[in-house]
């Protein structure tokens, strides 16, 4: 028996190597295809090569050893192939998520770099003019100082947005779950005569007043920024079962259907032209979405009338808590 081992090994290799080679070629052709299919092939190729070697050693005869080998290979296939397919799908989803995250990160860096350069350039020009004595008139110098302060406020707002977004992504936002009168939050967020509030009954919600107020302010800022001069932004509120809802309607002209799913992406601003005076860095809506989710609610966008509608849904407070707040 031992004397036949070299011969059996050569026969096994002669039968297994071609199968392994074909599997390698197949994997090479599938390298740009589905990762799930590649994982399945990667598991099947060694099993097929092993089975081919066993059959070759048995002299291509259906013997008891061949039958046992077929049973073992079949059992191994039933276990390993489904596991490989599930693993392939998991890795594929993770890879797609990583690519999307990297794309979003690069896009964010690009937007932020643009938005930081604009106010910094203005601050530099105005401070140089003041330092070099180009501006000597007190009234004009005061105007330059006010402009510098305005640009500084823009930079401070962008830094605050980045910090808030980083806290959301890190899961560090944990609002206090307490009854909050929605009327107080909306009235604090509404600071423009262009906003019309149409509410017949104000609900009491369960959540953090700061987080809900920040989310609504971001939605209102976005609506006012995209509503033409003379247009109106409308806020409505109501209740459905165990949740309260708030809608913010603008008159932006609508959002293209292909962009609706990307509205809450970081730094996404659609196809509209960017202007130096445009504030923010495309972070307001992602921050609003993150804060609403932290409150246990949901936020959605859809085209409505002459513009679009953002709908926020948050849990209602218990009836006893709601009565005590009124």
Image (cartoon, rainbow, N blue to C red):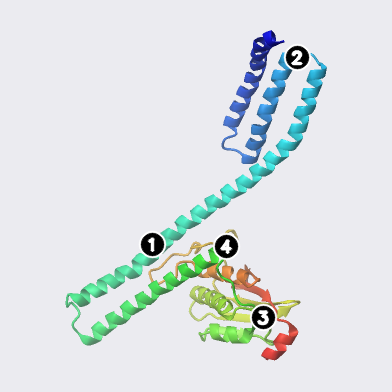
Of marks 3 and 4, which one's residue comes earlier in the chain? 3
Q: Measured from the top left, where is residue 55 in percent x and y?
A: 74, 17
Residue 205's label in the rendered image is: 3
| Residue 50 visible in image | yes
Q: Which mark is residue 256?
A: 4
Q: CA distance from mark 2 to mark 3?
A: 75 Å
Give the CA distance from mark 1 to mark 3. Answer: 38 Å
Location of residue 69 (image quadrant)? top right
- Is the Cβ of the residue at disc 2 closer than 8 Å to that at disc 1? no
User: Does 33 appear above or below 56?
Assistant: below
Callouts 2 and 3 close, C-beta under 8 Å: no
- Residue 107, compared with residue 302, is above or below; it is above
Q: Is residue 22 left or right of residue 77?
A: left
Question: What residue appears at the point 66 percent right and 43 percent down from the top-left corner?
Answer: 87
Q: Name the residue that disc number 1 marks.
A: 113
Q: Nearer the viewer, mark 2 or mark 3?
A: 2
Q: CA distance from mark 3 to mark 4?
A: 32 Å
Viewer-nearest of discs 1 and 3: 3
């Amino acid at each position: 028996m031992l004397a036949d081992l070299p011969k059996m090994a050569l026969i096994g290799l002669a039968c297994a190597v071609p199968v392994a080679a074909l599997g390698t070629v197949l994997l090479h052709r599938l390298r740009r295809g589905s990762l799930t299919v590649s994982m399945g092939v990667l598991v099947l190729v060694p099993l097929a090569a092993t089975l081919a070697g066993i059959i070759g050693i048995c002299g291509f005869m259906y013997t008891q050893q061949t039958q046992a080998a077929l049973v073992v290979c079949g059992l191994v296939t039933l276990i390993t192939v489904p596991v490989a397919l599930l693993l392939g799908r998991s890795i594929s989803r993770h890879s797609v998520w990583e690519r999307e995250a990297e794309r979003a990160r690069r896009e964010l860096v690009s937007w932020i770099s643009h938005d930081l350069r604009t106010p910094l350039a203005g601050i530099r020009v105005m401070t140089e003019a003041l330092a070099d004595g180009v501006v000597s008139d007190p009234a004009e110098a005061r105007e330059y100082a006010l402009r510098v302060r305005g640009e500084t406020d823009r930079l401070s707002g962008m830094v605050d947005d980045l910090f808030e977004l980083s806290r959301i992504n890190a899961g560090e936002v944990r609002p206090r779950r307490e009854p909050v009168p929605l009327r107080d939050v909306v009235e604090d967020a509404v600071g423009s005569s262009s906003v019309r509030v149409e509410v017949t009954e104000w609900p009491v919600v369960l959540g953090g007043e700061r987080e809900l107020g920040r989310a609504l302010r971001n939605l209102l800022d976005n609506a006012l920024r995209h509503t033409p001069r003379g247009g109106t932004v409308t806020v409505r509120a109501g209740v459905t079962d165990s949740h309260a809802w708030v809608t913010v309607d603008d008159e932006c002209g609508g959002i293209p259907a292909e962009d609706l799913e990307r509205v809450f992406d970081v730094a996404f601003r659609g196809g509209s032209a960017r202007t130096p005076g445009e504030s923010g860095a495309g972070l307001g809506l992602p921050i609003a979405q993150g804060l609403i989710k932290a409150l246990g609610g949901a936020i959605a966008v859809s085209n409505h009338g002459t513009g679009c509608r953002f709908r926020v849904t948050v849990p209602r407070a218990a009836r006893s808590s709601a009565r005590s707040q009124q």
